[in-house]
Amino acid sequence: MRFVLRALIPSRLRRAVRSRIDARYVNKAEHRKDIKDALWEVQVLRREVVSLRSEVDRLRQVVITPPKAPTVDLRGTDAHRLATETADALDRLLQNEMLVWQAIDALRAEIRTEFQARAVVTVDAE
């Protein structure tokens, strides 16, 4: 039968049909190349997944570990205490100074009124 087909079908037509059929199918070399490319892609993706997993683990550790409490600076607390005490002392000092000036003003007013009263008494006596 094969012989009959060769004899009946011209060689140009056979070659055209064969090339058309071969074009639809992948040959072994291309198939091997496609498999190698697919394996390479799988390896690249595997490396990326491993690096992403390590990054996720690192971020989880950052979230899980609570931040450390800040250490108290003793010099800072001493400075704050001293500043507060100084402010209180200055406030008392200014209040006392106001009381002194109020007392001085009261004495001046009293001396004026006494002086004016004496002046009135001396004017009346004359």
Image (cartoon, rainbow, N blue to C red):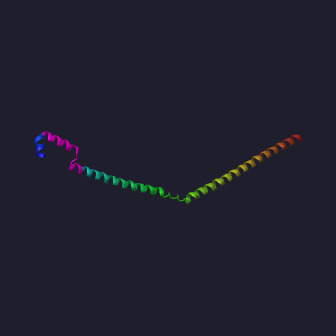
Please tell me which residue is depicted at 11% across the width and 40% down the height of the picture: 8
Relative placement, left or right, of 107 versus 20 is right
Relative placement, left or right, of 14 versus 79 is left
Q: Nearer the viewer, residue 102 or 89?
A: 89
Q: Position of residue 122 (x, y in %)?
A: 86, 42
Q: Nearer the viewer, residue 109 or 20?
A: 20
Residue 27 appears in view: yes
Q: Position of residue 123 (x, y in %)?
A: 86, 40
Q: Position of residue 126 (x, y in %)?
A: 89, 40
* Residue 19 among magenta residues: yes
Q: Nearer the viewer, residue 43 or 118?
A: 43
Please tell me which residue is depicted at 68% across the width and 50% down the height of the picture: 94
Q: Position of residue 75 (x, y in %)?
A: 56, 59
Residue 126 appears in view: no
* Residue 6 among magenta residues: no
Find residue 20 and report its image quarter: top left
Magenta stretch prevailing secondary structure: helix
As drawn, the residue found furthest toward the front would be 1
* Residue 24, above or below 60: above
Relative placement, left or right, of 96 versus 21 is right
Find residue 54 and report its image quarter: bottom left
Please tell me which residue is depicted at 33% across the width and 52% down the height of the picture: 45
The part of the chain drawn in magenta is 12-32
